[in-house]
C-alpha cells in the first residue's frame, strides 16, 4: 500500500502528528453474538462524529473503525462449509497495495509465513467496499482490502491462546519482512477490525459487510479519529488490535526507548523460540496508540490478562493513598520495577474478544460515560446520549462514568460488569507482590551511612569558575532558591540570543528547550493536583518483562532525584549481593585539548559497558576528578552518551545512571539530565555553593547549611515537577529518558550520536565547540588565584560586558526619543541598531537576508500606505492587573486609532470601555482573551469582542498559568476579574475544558456561540510540532492562529521557564506555514506571529515566513515608557506600567500617540523594504519565503554550523496554492438547536411576555443556550432579561457545554442527562438537570452530567439531581450550585460563589480554592480526608450560612424534584449538623477586612469614586 | 536588589559639603561623606533595574546596581571588589566624575531623584583605604614583555596597572616632578587631596610598575629609545594644547591659560614652588564656564581676589532637563551651579569677549552679549567693559602636544588627536589612550581608555613576534566581551 503521508520535509515531520477522538463500545452481557450489537455501535459512532475531524477535503475523515468478535456465522455463510470450528481459524484484515505485482509479492509473503509457521491458509477473501462513499483524498490512497483466513494446525486447534499467539507471530514476521507496505489491522481467531480513512457515517456504507444480518458479535468497539494534520492514514485509524484510544501518550519517546532496551532480555515460556521472531515489537512510524497497542499485545499474549497489562501500563496514582489496600499498593510498586507508566491523558477502551473495558489516566483527563440496560446491554462512550434513540430511559438501570485510574470491565463470560475493586483485588493477589516489594525493595534512606567524600583539593571559587559559575548563579538563582525553597521569578521575557548565537559559550543544557503540552494534551497542575505527581525514582537492574519473580522487585528506591552528598556516598558504598555501584570518571586530560572530549566519551561508554559486565547496576558518572589537569565533560553529554550507548547495546536496563557533577545548578539542568536518562543527580558544587551562601551571610540569619541545602533541594524538586507537568507527565520514571526536549543549535551528528531522536532543526555546534567551551572555562580557573570574583553573566539583567540583550540602554532610549518627538530619523537610528545587532548576535531573523531587487525595486509611492499596513498589527495580551489601567487603556486607544487590535489579556475588561469616549477614542480592546483562569469572561465580555482569543500557552511560560500576586489585586482589578480583592489569582496550567484537540474544537464552537460575529483565534507557542497543532487548530474551525516565540512575555514567570521553554518564532512560524500549505489548510486561517518583534524589518521577515499579521507587546510598552525594569511581579514599576500602586501609576507618562507613532514608523520601515523587494501590497509578501536567504556574509554563525535551510524551505505545493488566508472557514453554527430556541424566544427578548416551552435535545446538540445568551445580551446588555423570562425545558441527552454563557433571565431545565462542561461561563442564567421520571435508577447514585461543570461560571444558579464528574465548579467565581455527588478536584480554583454537595466528593476537593464557599453533606465524617486543606478551613454551618444553604436545598428540591433534598428538608435541623462548611482562609480574611486598598480612577466597577458617589447619592 | 519599594519612601541625599565660608579659608577637600546609615539608605533606593541605565551611562561600565546593593547590605569589602573590577581608581572618579550615571539613573526619569551613586562610590573607596583592604596586587608571574607608558595621568596609570597585573613589565615616564598628571597639577587640593593620588601611585610602585618622573619623552629622551627598548609604547600624554582667545590685548601681562595658573597653585599648596601668577586682591575674570574655569574661580577665592567673574560664551541653559533636546537618559544640558560659584563670584552667559586692554598689564575686559547659540551673533548695543587684573582662559583644549607625535611619526586625525581607532596607532607597537586619543574628556573616560588600551596592548603582545613568553599568565580581569 502506498504510504499516504508525505515524509519529513523542511520543518514538517509526520512523526509529530497528534490525534484524539471519540470512542465507544457496546457489549451484550449474555455474550450472545448479534448483529444488533454491531448496529448499535455504528449508531453510537455516528453520534460521535462531531468529535472526529475532516481534512481540507470535507469528505475525507481522519479515520473511523470498528472492532468485533469474529462473526463466525457470517464467514460460514461467505466461505462455505470448509471452515473449521469457531476458534480454530483466524481471520486477518489486510491493507494491500493496489498494484497487482506488489500485492502479489506481499500475499505470497504472507502465505509463505503462514506455512512456515505450520498453519494452513484457507483462502483470501476480497472485502467488498463502496468507494463512492469516501472522500477524494482518502480514496486516492485507499488500499485493497483483503481478508486472510488461516486454519489452526492440529496442535493448536484446541489451544486457543496458543493459536492466537501463533497468529501474532505470523503477523509480526510478515510485517517485519514486508516493511511499511504491508498493513494488517487485525489477525486473530477472536477479533476482527474494519477501519479506514473515513468519517464516522461513511464506515457502514464503505464496508457493506457491516450491514449483513449475519455479521454478529457480542461486543463492538468503535472509534472516530481527529488528527492534527490532514495526512491521516488508513493504517492509523483506530481501533487497533486490542485498543481504541482517546488521548495522547506524552511519554512516548521514553517508553519506546525503554521498550527497545528491554527487548534484549525478553524471554517467554509461552512464546519459546518464537519470541525473537517478533522483535522489535514496536512497528516504526506508528502513532502513540499504535505503539501502546504493540506493547499491550505482547504483554497479553505472553500470559498476562488484559486488565493486568492495562494496570501495568497505566497505573493509578497509588503512592500515599490510605484508601488503597496494601496488596494493590504492592502490585503497583512491584510493577513500577518492571515498567514505567505510559503517561498522558487517555481513555483507552480495550478488548481481547472475551472481556471489554476501558480505563482512564490517573488524572481523569478524558471523558467516558456508560450505562447498563435492564435487558443486558452495556454501552460506554466518550459522551452520554450516543444511543438515546435506542435505549429508553426506563430501560436504563445504571449510569456511570470512567474515573481516574479506575478500570471499567465487562466480562462476557461472566455476563456482568466487574467492579473495579474486585478485578483489581483479584489481579493484585495473583502473586504476593506486596510481600515481594517489602522483602526485596530497598530504600536509599535505609542504606547504612558511608564515609564522607574526601574534602575537595581545590578552592571553591576555582571550581566554580571551572564549571562556569557566574555571580548571578549565586544571587539571582541559588540564594532565592535556598531562601524560599522556590525557583526565582523574573519578568519581561527573554531578549538574549539563543545559546547557539551567544558568544558566551553557554553550558550544554541551554541548548535544550523544554517541550510543553498545548492543545493535544494538557499540562498537569503540579501544585493543585499534586496527588497525582511523584518524584520517586529507582535504580537497579530490570529483569525480563514477561516474567514475574520476587527478584523483579530488587530495586533501590530514591525518594528524591536530587541527592545530597551523604546520600550519594551511601549509594556508592552500597554493599549487597544485589546492588553494586561503579563510578566512572567523566573528565579528560586538559593536555589533550579539544580532541580529548570525543576520546573521553568513548572511554566513558566502554568503561560503563565493562562495569555492567562485571555486575554493576548503579553507574555513577562523576566529574569530581576535574582539576588543574583534567577538564569535566559536560555532564549532560556524558549522561546522554552512556544512556544511548547502553540502549543500543541492549544493556541499559541492567543499570541506573546517577550523575555526580559540579555543573548542574538549576531546575532546568537537572530536568535535562533526568530527561536523558539520569535516575538521580548529585549537584555537589551547587550544594557547596549554597553552603557558601550561608557562611557568607547571604541567607537569612539562623539558617543552617543543612537547612539551606534541604530547601534548595526541595525547591529544585518542585521545579522539576513543574517541568514534568508542563508536558503532562506525572512521575519521574516516565520522565526519565523521555527526552521531552527540542535541541536548538546543535549539530546533526552530535544529536544522532548522543541525543538520538531529539528534534534539532537548525543545525549548530558540535563536539569541538563543546570541548572549547569546557576548555575556556578551565582556563578561567587555572592558573588563577582561586579567589577571583566570579564573572557577571548579564542574563537576567543587562550588563555591559555580559550577554547581549535586544532591549538595552541604547535601543530603549532611541525608541522612546523617537516616538515622543515623532522623529522618524531617530526611529531609523533605533531600527538600524536593532537590525544590525540582530544580524550580529541575537536572532535567527538577523541571519536572514532579504532578496531585494537589483533594479532597486518599485517607487515607494506605489507601496500600500502605512495606514493600511498598521491594521495588521496588534498588541499582546497583557492583562489589566498585570499592567495598570492607564497603560492598558493607552494601548487600546492607540490601537483603535490606527485600526489595529489591542488585547484584554487574561483579566477581563471594564464594561465602561465598551462605550466610546466623547472625543471619539475607544478604550475597548478588540481582542478579548479567554485563558485558563477565565477571569472576567462572561456573556457580555464575549459579546463585545471582535476577536476571541484562546490562550493555549504564553511565550514566557508555556505550560503554566498566569499569576497575579495578591498585592496587585485591588478592588478595581478584583471587580473586573469578578474575584475577591486582596486574594492572589493563579490560572490553572491547563484549560480544564481543553485536554485534547477535539476539546479545543468544542471550545471554539462554544465561543462562536458566545459571539457568532467574532473571529476565533488560538494562541500557541512555538515548539517542535507546533505546525501540526496549528493544522489541528485550522481543522477545529478557528479563524486565526497565533504562533508566539519563546522570547516574548511580559508577565512574571519562573526564570527557568523564561529561558528554557519554547523556541524562536522564526522556526515555529515557518513550521506552521509549511505544514498548513502542505495540508492545503493555509487558505482558511489567518496566521499571526509575535515575540520580540521590534522593527519594520522584523515585520517583513515575519510576513515572508508566512504571517498575515504581527503582534507586539514589549515594544509598545517601551514606547509608553517601559524601561525593562523586569520588576513586573513586584508592583514597583517606577514608570507606572506594571503596577497598581496609585503613587507609581501617577508617574505613567505614556500617550496613545507614542504607540501610534511607533506602529507607523514600523510600517513605514516595512514599506521601504517592500519597495526594495518590488512588492506593492502587503498580502503579496505573505509566505514568500523564496524572498529570504541565509545571509552568507555572516561568517561567524555559519562557523557554528547553523543551517537555516529547513526554515527557509519552500513547501512543495501545487502552483498557485494559497500562501495566505483567502477564504473563511465553513460556517459551523448552521444546524444549532439554538436557532429554534431563539425563534421561540424572540418576542420575549424584545420585551414580550415570559415564555415557557419544551424541546427535544440530543448529544449532538452542543452548547445549547449559548447563542440564545448572545441574542439576549446583544438585545439587553449585561443585565439580560428579568428573572424567569424564558423557561425552557429540554428532554434527552444534552451535548457538551449545555447552558454555556447562559445570561440572566434564561432558565434551562434538562430532563435526561448531560455531557461535559455544563454551565461553562454561566453568566446569570439558571440550570436544572434531572433524570426523566420514568428512569429505572436512583438519580443520586448515578451520573447526571460529566466533567468540568460550571468552569469559569460568574453568576447564576445550577441544580444537578445526580452525581457529576471531576472538577465540578472549577474556577467558579459567582454561580450558586447544588449537586448530589462530585468526582475528584471539586471546587478547584474556585474564587467565588456557593457550591452545595449533597453527597460524596472525590479526592482533592477545594484544591486552589481561594474564594467562595462550599457546603458539603458529610454523611460518614470522612470528607476531611478527601479535602485539600492547603487553602481552606472546615467549619460547621450556622447562622447566615444556614439560611443560604436552606434556600439552595429548597430550590434544588423544587427545580429537580430531588428525593435527597426532600429527605434532608424533612429533618432539617439534623441535616444541618451533618454539613461542613468549606471556607478559604484568604476569602475569610478578605470578608473580614473591607479596608483593602481602593483603586483610583476606575469607572464601570466598584472603585473609590463609585463608592463615594454612591454614598453621596 | 536594594530594598523593595524603598525609592518610594526615601529621598535622594545630596552630597554633603563643608560650608563655603569655612572652606574657602583652606585647601582641604570640601566634600564630605554621608554617614553610614544614610549611605545604606541610598543603596536601598537602588531598584536593581533589568536594564540599569546608570551602568550604561558610566563610561567605565561600573557595576553600579551590584555595589549599591552590597552597600545597602553593609558588605563593603565585596562592594570594593566589584568596584575595582571595572574601575582602577574609584577614589579619583568618586571625587571628580560629574556622574553621568546619576543622570541616567532610572529614578532620574522623575528629575532630581537619582540614587546618590557617586557618593556611594566614594564611600566604598574611602572605606577600602581606611580598612587597609587596598593593597598591592603584584602579578603571580611575569610575561617577560615590557611596555613604556608616556604620561602618568589617569589613563596612563590605569593602563600601567592593568598591564602590570597581566604580567608585563611597565615603565611610566612623566615629565613633571610627580605622578598623576592633571589629577596632581590641574585639579586643586580642595577637590582631591594629593595624598589620595600619592597612595595610589605607591600601590602601583609596590605592584612593580616603574615610575620615572622628570623625564620628558621627546624632550630629554629620544622616543626611539622607547620603541627600541620596549615591546610596546603607550602614549597617554593628554590633550594639553589649550584653546586660545585671539583678540586684541591677548598679549598683555596678566592674561594666562587656566592650566598655567592651576599648576602654579597646586605647586604652591604643595610648597614645592613659588607662584608667579596671583589672584590676590585682583579683579579676576575667568573666561569659560566649565570645570577648569570653576577650579580657577575657587582658587581665586582662596587667594582672596577682589572679585571673580566667570563668563561663558553659550547662553544660559534651562533650569531643568530639556526633554526635547537631551531627554533622559542623556546628559541633560541644564543650568548647574558649580561649587566654586556657591563660594562667591558672578557669572554671565552668552558673552563674547571682544578685547582686553591695559598698559603692559591687563586692566580691562570688553565684551558683548550674544545670541547664546551658534554662530553667537552679537547683540547690538550690549557692549560692556569690566575691570580685570587677572584674566584666565579656561576654554578647553584642542588636542595633544604635537612634538612627540611628530617625532614618533604617529598619524593624527582631523582634530589633531592621535589616530588610534582600536588604540593601536599608525606606528607598529605604539598605542595611544586617554585624552591624547579621544580629545579632552572626563576622568572616567581616561580610566576607561587606559583599561581598554591595556587589553589591546595585551592582545597585541600575545601575537606579536618577539622575545619568548616566559610563563603562562592569567588573562586580564574581567575577560572583556565587547563587540
Image (spheres, coloured by chain):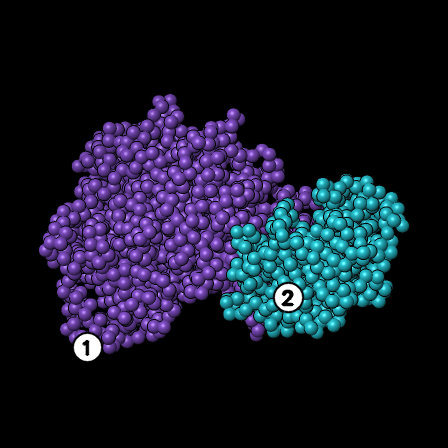
Residue receiving disc 2: B120
Which residue is outermost to the top?
A101
Q: Chain of mark 2?
A: B
Q: Which chain is cyan?
A: B
Q: Return the x and y of residue A1356 as percentages of the image width and height.
A: 22, 61
Q: Secondary structure at mark 2?
A: helix
Point 33% across, 51% down: residue: A919
The image quarter containing residue A937 is bottom left
Tell me: A344 left or right of A561.
left
Question: Is residue A248 depicted above or below A524 in this figure?
Answer: above
Q: Secondary structure at mark 1?
A: helix
Tell me: A1051 left or right of A1009.
right
Which of B134/A698 is in front? B134
Q: Which chain is purple?
A: A
Is residue A1 visible in the rendered structure shown here? yes
Tell me: A1264 left or right of A499.
left
Point 68% across, 44% down: residue: A594
The image quarter containing residue B126 is bottom right
Q: Return the x and y of residue A732 as percentages of the image width and height.
A: 47, 56
Pair 2/1: label in front = 2
Question: Is residue A1210 depicted above or below A164 in this figure?
Answer: above
Which of A229/A130 is in front? A229
Residue receiving disc 1: A1469
Which of A737/B346 is in front? B346
Which residue is outermost to the front?
B381
- Report the disc number at residue A336: none
Amino acid at each position: 500500500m502506498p504510504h499516504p503521508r508525505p515524509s519529513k520535509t523542511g520543518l514538517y515531520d509526520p512523526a509529530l502528528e497528534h490525534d484524539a477522538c471519540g470512542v465507544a463500545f457496546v457489549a451484550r452481557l449474555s455474550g450472545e453474538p448479534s448483529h444488533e450489537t454491531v448496529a448499535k455501535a455504528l449508531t453510537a459512532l455516528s453520534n460521535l462524529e462531531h468529535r472526529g475531524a475532516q481534512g481540507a477535503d470535507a469528505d475525507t475523515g481522519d479515520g473511523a473503525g470498528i472492532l468485533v468478535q469474529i462473526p463466525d456465522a457470517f464467514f460460514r455463510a461467505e466461505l462455505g462449509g470448509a471452515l473449521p470450528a469457531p476458534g480454530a481459524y483466524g481471520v486477518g484484515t489486510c491493507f494491500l497495495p493496489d498494484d497487482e505485482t506488489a500485492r502479489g509479492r506481499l500475499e505470497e509473503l504472507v502465505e509463505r509465513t503462514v506455512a512456515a509457521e505450520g498453519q494452513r491458509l484457507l483462502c483470501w477473501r476480497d472485502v467488498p467496499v463502496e468507494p463512492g462513499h469516501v472522500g477524494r483524498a482518502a480514496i486516492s490512497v485507499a488500499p485493497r482490502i483483503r481478508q486472510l483466513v488461516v486454519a489452526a494446525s492440529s496442535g493448536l486447534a484446541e489451544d486457543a491462546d496458543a493459536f492466537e499467539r501463533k497468529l501474532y507471530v505470523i503477523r509480526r514476521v510478515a510485517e517485519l519482512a514486508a516493511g511499511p507496505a504491508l498493513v494488517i489491522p487485525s489477525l486473530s481467531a477472536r477479533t476482527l477490525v474494519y477501519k479506514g480513512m473515513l468519517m464516522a457515517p461513511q464506515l457502514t456504507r464503505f464496508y457493506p459487510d457491516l450491514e449483513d444480518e449475519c455479521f454478529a458479535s457480542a461486543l463492538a468497539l468503535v472509534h472516530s479519529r481527529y488528527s492534527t494534520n490532514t495526512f491521516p492514514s488508513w493504517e492509523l485509524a483506530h481501533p487497533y488490535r486490542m485498543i481504541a484510544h482517546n488521548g495522547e501518550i506524552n511519554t512516548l519517546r521514553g517508553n519506546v526507548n525503554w521498550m527497545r532496551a528491554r527487548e534484549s532480555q525478553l524471554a517467554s515460556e509461552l512464546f519459546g523460540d518464537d519470541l525473537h521472531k517478533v522483535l522489535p515489537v514496536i512497528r516504526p512510524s506508528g502513532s502513540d496508540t499504535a505503539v501502546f497497542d504493540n506493547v499491550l499485545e505482547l504483554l497479553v499474549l505472553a500470559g498476562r490478562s488484559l486488565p493486568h497489562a492495562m494496570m501495568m501500563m497505566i497505573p493509578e496514582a497509588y503512592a500515599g493513598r490510605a484508601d488503597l489496600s496494601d496488596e494493590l499498593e504492592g502490585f503497583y510498586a512491584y510493577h513500577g520495577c518492571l515498567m514505567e507508566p505510559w503517561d498522558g491523558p487517555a481513555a483507552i477502551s480495550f478488548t481481547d474478544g472475551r472481556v471489554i473495558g476501558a480505563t482512564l489516566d490517573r488524572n481523569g483527563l478524558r471523558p467516558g460515560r456508560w450505562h447498563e440496560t435492564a435487558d443486558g446491554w452495556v454501552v460506554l462512550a466518550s459522551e452520554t446520549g450516543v444511543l438515546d434513540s435506542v435505549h429508553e430511559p426506563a430501560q436504563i438501570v445504571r449510569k456511570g462514568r470512567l474515573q481516574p485510574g479506575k478500570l471499567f470491565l465487562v466480562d462476557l463470560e461472566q455476563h456482568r460488569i466487574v467492579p473495579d475493586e474486585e478485578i483489581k483485588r483479584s489481579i493484585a493477589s495473583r502473586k504476593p507482590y506486596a510481600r515481594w516489594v517489602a522483602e526485596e525493595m530497598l530504600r536509599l534512606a535505609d542504606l547504612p551511612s558511608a564515609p564522607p567524600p574526601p574534602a575537595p583539593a581545590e578552592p571553591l571559587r576555582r571550581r566554580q569558575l571551572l564549571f562556569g559559575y557566574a555571580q548571578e548563579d549565586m544571587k539571582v538563582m541559588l540564594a532565592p532558591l535556598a531562601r524560599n525553597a522556590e525557583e526565582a521569578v523574573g519578568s519581561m521575557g527573554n531578549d538574549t540570543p539563543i545559546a547557539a548565537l551567544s558568544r558566551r559559550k553557554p553550558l550544554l543544557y541551554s541548548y535544550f528547550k523544554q517541550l510543553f503540552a498545548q492543545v493535544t494534551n494538557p499540562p498537569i497542575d503540579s501544585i493543585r493536583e499534586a496527588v497525582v505527581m511523584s518524584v520517586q525514582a529507582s535504580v537497579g537492574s530490570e529483569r525480563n518483562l514477561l516474567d514475574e519473580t520476587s527478584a523483579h522487585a530488587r530495586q533501590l528506591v530514591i525518594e528524591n532525584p536530587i541527592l545530597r552528598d551523604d546520600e550519594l556516598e551511601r549509594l556508592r558504598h552500597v554493599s549487597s549481593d544485589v546492588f553494586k555501584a561503579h563510578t566512572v570518571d567523566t573528565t579528560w586530560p586538559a593536555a589533550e585539548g579539544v580532541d580529548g572530549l570525543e576520546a573521553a566519551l568513548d572511554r566513558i561508554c566502554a568503561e560503563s559497558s565493562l562495569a555492567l559486565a562485571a555486575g554493576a547496576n548503579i553507574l555513577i558518572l562523576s566529574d569530581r576528578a576535574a582539576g588543574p589537569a583534567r577538564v569535566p565533560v559536560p555532564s549532560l553529554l556524558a549522561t546522554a552518551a552512556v544512556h544511548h550507548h547502553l540502549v543500543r547495546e541492549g544493556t541499559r536496563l541492567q543499570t541506573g545512571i546517577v550523575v555526580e557533577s559540579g555543573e548542574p545548578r538549576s531546575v532546568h539542568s537537572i530536568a535535562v539530565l533526568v530527561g536523558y536518562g539520569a535516575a538521580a543527580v548529585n549537584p555537589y558544587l551547587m550544594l557547596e555553593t549554597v553552603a557558601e551562601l550561608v557562611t557568607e551571610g547571604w541567607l537569612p540569619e539562623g539558617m543552617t547549611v543543612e537547612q539551606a541545602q534541604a530547601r534548595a533541594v526541595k525547591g529544585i524538586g518542585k521545579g522539576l515537577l513543574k517541568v514534568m507537568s508542563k508536558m503532562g507527565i506525572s512521575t519521574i520514571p516516565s520522565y526519565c529518558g523521555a527526552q521531552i526536549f527540542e535541541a536548538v543549535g546543535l549539530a546533526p551528528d552530535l544529536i544522532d550520536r548522543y541525543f538520538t531522536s531529539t528534534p534539532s532543526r537548525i543545525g549548530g555546534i558540535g563536539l569541538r565547540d563543546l570541548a572549547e567551551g569546557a576548555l575556556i572555562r578551565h582556563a578561567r580557573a587555572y592558573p588563577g588565584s582561586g579567589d577571583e570574583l566570579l564573572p557577571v553573566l548579564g542574563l537576567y539583567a543587562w550588563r555591559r560586558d555580559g550577554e547581549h540583550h535586544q532591549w538595552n540602554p541604547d535601543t530603549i532610549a532611541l525608541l522612546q526619543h523617537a516616538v515622543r518627538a515623532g522623529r522618524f530619523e531617530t526611529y531609523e537610528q533605533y531600527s538600524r541598531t536593532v537590525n544590525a545587532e540582530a544580524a550580529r548576535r541575537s536572532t535567527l531573523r538577523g541571519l536572514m537576508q532579504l532578496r531585494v531587487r537589483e533594479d532597486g525595486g518599485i517607487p515607494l509611492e506605489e507601496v500600500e500606505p502605512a495606514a493600511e499596513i498598521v491594521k495588521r498589527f496588534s498588541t499582546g495580551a497583557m492583562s489589566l492587573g498585570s499592567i495598570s489601567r492607564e497603560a492598558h487603556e493607552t494601548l487600546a486607544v492607540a490601537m483603535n486609532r490606527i485600526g489595529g487590535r489591542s488585547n484584554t489579556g487574561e483579566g477581563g475588561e471594564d464594561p465602561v470601555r465598551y462605550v466610546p469616549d466623547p472625543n471619539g477614542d475607544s478604550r475597548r480592546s478588540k481582542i478579548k482573551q479567554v485563558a485558563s483562569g477565565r477571569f472576567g469572561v462572561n456573556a457580555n465580555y464575549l459579546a463585545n469582542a471582535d476577536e476571541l482569543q484562546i490562550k493555549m500557552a504564553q511565550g514566557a511560560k508555556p505550560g503554566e498559568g498566569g499569576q497575579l500576586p495578591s498585592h496587585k489585586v485591588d478592588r478595581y482589578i478584583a471587580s473586573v476579574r469578578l474575584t475577591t480583592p486582596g486574594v492572589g489569582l493563579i490560572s490553572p496550567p491547563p484549560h480544564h475544558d481543553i485536554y485534547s484537540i477535539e476539546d479545543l474544537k468544542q471550545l471554539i464552537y462554544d465561543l462562536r456561540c458566545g459571539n457568532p460575529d467574532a473571529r476565533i483565534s488560538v494562541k500557541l507557542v512555538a515548539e517542535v510540532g507546533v505546525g501540526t497543532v496549528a493544522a489541528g487548530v485550522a481543522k477545529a474551525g478557528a479563524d486565526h492562529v497565533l504562533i508566539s516565540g519563546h522570547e516574548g512575555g511580559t508577565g512574571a514567570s519562573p526564570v527557568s521557564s523564561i529561558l528554557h521553554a519554547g523556541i524562536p518564532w522564526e522556526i515555529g512560524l515557518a513550521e506552521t506555514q509549511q505544514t498548513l500549505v502542505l495540508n492545503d489548510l493555509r487558505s482558511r486561517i489567518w496566521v499571526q506571529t509575535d515575540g520580540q518583534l521590534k522593527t519594520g524589518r522584523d515585520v517583513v521577515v515575519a510576513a515572508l515566513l508566512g504571517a498575515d499579521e504581527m503582534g507586539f507587546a514589549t515594544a509598545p510598552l517601551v514606547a509608553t515608557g517601559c524601561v525593562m525594569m523586569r520588576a513586573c511581579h513586584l508592583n514597583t514599576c517606577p514608570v507606572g506600567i506594571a503596577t497598581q500602586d496609585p503613587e507609581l501609576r501617577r508617574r505613567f507618562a505614556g500617550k496613545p500617540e507614542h504607540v501610534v507613532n511607533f506602529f507607523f514608523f514600523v510600517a513605514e520601515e516595512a514599506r521601504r523594504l517592500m519597495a526594495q523587494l518590488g512588492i506593492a501590497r502587503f498580502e503579496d509578501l505573505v509566505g514568500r519565503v523564496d524572498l529570504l536567504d541565509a545571509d552568507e556574509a555572516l561568517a561567524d554563525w555559519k562557523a557554528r554550523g547553523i543551517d537555516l535551510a529547513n526554515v527557509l524551505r519552500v513547501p512543495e505545493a501545487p502552483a498557485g496554492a494559497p500562501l495566505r488566508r483567502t477564504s473563511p472557514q465553513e460556517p459551523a453554527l448552521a444546524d444549532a438547536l439554538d436557532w429554534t430556541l431563539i425563534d421561540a424566544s424572540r418576542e420575549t427578548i424584545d420585551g414580550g411576555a415570559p415564555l415557557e416551552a419544551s424541546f427535544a435535545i440530543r448529544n449532538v446538540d452542543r452548547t445549547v443556550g449559548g447563542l440564545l445568551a448572545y441574542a439576549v445580551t446583544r438585545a439587553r446588555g449585561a443585565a439580560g432579561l428579568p428573572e424567569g423570562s424564558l423557561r425552557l425545558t429540554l428532554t434527552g441527552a444534552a451535548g457538551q457545554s449545555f447552558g454555556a454563557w447562559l445570561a440572566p433571565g434564561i432558565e434551562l431545565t434538562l430532563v435526561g442527562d448531560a455531557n461535559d462542561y455544563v454551565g461553562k461561563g454561566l453568566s446569570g442564567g439558571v440550570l436544572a438537570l434531572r433524570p426523566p421520571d420514568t428512569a429505572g435508577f436512583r438519580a443520586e447514585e448515578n451520573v447526571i452530567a460529566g466533567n468540568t461543570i460550571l468552569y469559569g461560571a460568574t453568576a447564576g444558579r445550577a441544580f444537578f439531581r445526580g452525581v457529576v464528574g471531576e472538577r465540578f465548579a472549577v474556577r467558579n467565581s459567582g454561580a450558586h450550585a447544588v449537586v448530589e455527588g462530585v468526582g475528584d478536584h471539586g471546587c478547584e480554583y474556585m474564587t467565588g460563589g456557593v457550591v452545595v454537595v449533597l453527597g460524596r466528593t472525590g479526592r482533592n476537593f477545594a484544591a486552589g480554592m481561594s474564594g467562595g464557599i462550599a457546603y458539603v453533606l458529610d454523611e460518614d465524617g470522612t470528607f476531611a480526608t478527601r479535602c485539600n486543606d492547603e487553602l481552606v478551613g472546615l467549619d460547621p454551618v450556622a447562622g447566615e450560612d444556614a439560611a443560604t444553604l436552606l434556600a439552595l436545598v429548597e430550590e434544588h428540591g423544587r427545580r429537580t424534584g430531588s428525593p435527597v433534598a426532600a429527605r434532608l428538608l424533612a429533618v432539617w435541623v439534623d441535616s444541618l449538623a451533618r454539613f461542613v462548611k468549606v471556607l478559604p482562609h484568604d476569602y475569610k480574611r478578605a470578608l473580614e477586612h473591607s479596608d483593602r486598598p481602593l483603586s483610583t480612577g476606575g469607572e464601570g466597577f466598584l472603585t473609590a469614586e463609585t463608592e463615594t458617589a454612591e454614598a453621596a447619592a | 536588589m536594594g530594598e523593595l519599594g524603598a525609592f518610594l519612601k526615601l529621598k535622594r541625599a545630596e552630597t554633603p559639603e563643608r560650608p563655603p565660608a569655612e572652606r574657602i579659608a583652606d585647601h582641604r577637600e570640601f566634600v564630605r561623606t554621608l554617614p553610614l546609615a544614610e549611605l545604606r539608605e541610598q543603596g536601598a533606593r537602588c531598584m536593581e533595574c533589568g536594564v540599569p541605565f546608570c551602568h550604561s551611562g558610566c563610561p567605565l561600565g561600573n557595576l553600579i546596581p551590584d555595589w549599591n546593593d552590597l552597600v545597602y547590605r553593609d558588605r563593603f569589602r565585596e562592594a570594593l571588589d566589584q568596584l575595582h573590577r571595572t574601575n582602577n581608581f574609584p577614589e579619583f572618579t568618586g571625587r571628580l566624575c560629574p556622574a553621568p550615571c546619576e543622570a541616567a539613573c532610572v529614578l532620574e526619569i522623575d528629575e532630581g531623584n537619582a540614587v546618590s551613586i557617586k557618593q556611594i562610590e566614594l564611600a566604598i573607596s574611602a572605606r577600602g583605604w581606611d580598612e587597609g583592604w587596598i593593597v598591592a596586587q603584584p602579578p603571580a608571574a611575569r610575561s617577560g614583555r615590557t611596555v613604556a607608558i608616556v604620561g602618568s595621568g589617569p589613563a596612563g596609570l590605569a593602563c600601567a596597572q592593568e598591564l602590570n597585573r597581566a604580567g608585563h613589565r611597565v615603565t611610566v615616564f612623566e615629565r613633571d616632578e610627580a605622578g598623576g598628571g592633571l589629577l596632581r597639577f590641574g585639579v586643586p587640593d580642595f577637590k582631591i587631596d594629593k595624598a589620595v593620588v600619592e597612595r595610589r601611585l605607591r600601590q602601583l610602585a609596590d605592584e612593580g610598575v616603574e615610575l620615572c618622573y622628570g623625564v620628558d619623552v621627546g624632550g630629554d629622551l629620544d622616543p626611539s629609545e622607547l620603541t627600541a627598548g620596549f615591546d610596546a609604547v603607550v602614549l597617554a600624554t593628554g590633550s594639553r594644547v589649550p584653546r586660545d582667545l585671539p583678540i586684541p590685548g591677548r598679549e598683555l601681562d596678566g592674561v594666562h591659560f587656566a592650566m598655567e595658573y592651576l599648576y602654579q597653585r597646586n605647586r604652591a599648596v604643595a610648597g614645592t614652588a613659588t607662584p608667579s601668577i596671583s589672584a590676590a586682591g585682583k579683579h579676576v575674570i575667568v573666561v569659560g564656564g566649565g570645570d577648569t574655569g570653576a577650579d580657577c574661580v575657587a582658587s581665586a577665592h582662596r587667594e582672596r581676589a577682589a572679585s571673580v567673574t566667570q563668563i561663558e560664551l553659550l547662553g544660559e541653559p534651562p533650569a531643568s532637563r530639556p526633554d526635547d533636546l537631551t531627554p533622559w537618559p542623556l546628559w541633560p544640558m541644564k543650568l548647574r551651579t558649580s561649587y566654586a560659584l556657591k563660594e562667591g563670584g558672578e557669572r554671565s552667559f552668552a558673552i563674547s569677549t571682544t578685547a582686553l586692554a591695559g598698559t603692559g598689564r591687563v586692566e580691562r575686559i570688553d565684551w558683548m552679549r550674544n545670541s547664546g547659540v551658534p554662530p553667537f551673533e552679537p547683540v547690538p548695543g550690549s557692549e560692556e567693559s569690566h575691570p580685570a587684573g587677572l584674566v584666565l582662559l579656561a576654554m578647553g583644549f584642542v588636542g595633544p602636544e604635537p612634538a612627540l607625535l611628530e617625532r614618533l611619526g604617529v598619524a593624527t586625525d582631523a582634530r589633531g588627536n592621535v589616530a588610534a581607532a582600536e588604540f593601536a596607532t599608525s606606528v607598529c607597537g605604539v598605542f595611544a589612550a586617554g585624552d591624547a586619543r579621544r580629545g579632552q574628556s572626563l576622568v572616567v573616560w581616561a580610566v576607561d581608555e587606559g583599561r581598554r588600551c591595556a587589553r589591546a596592548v595585551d592582545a597585541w603582545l600575545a601575537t606579536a613576534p618577539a622575545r619568548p613568553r616566559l610563563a603562562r599568565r592569567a588573562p586580564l580581569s574581567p575577560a572583556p566581551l565587547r563587540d
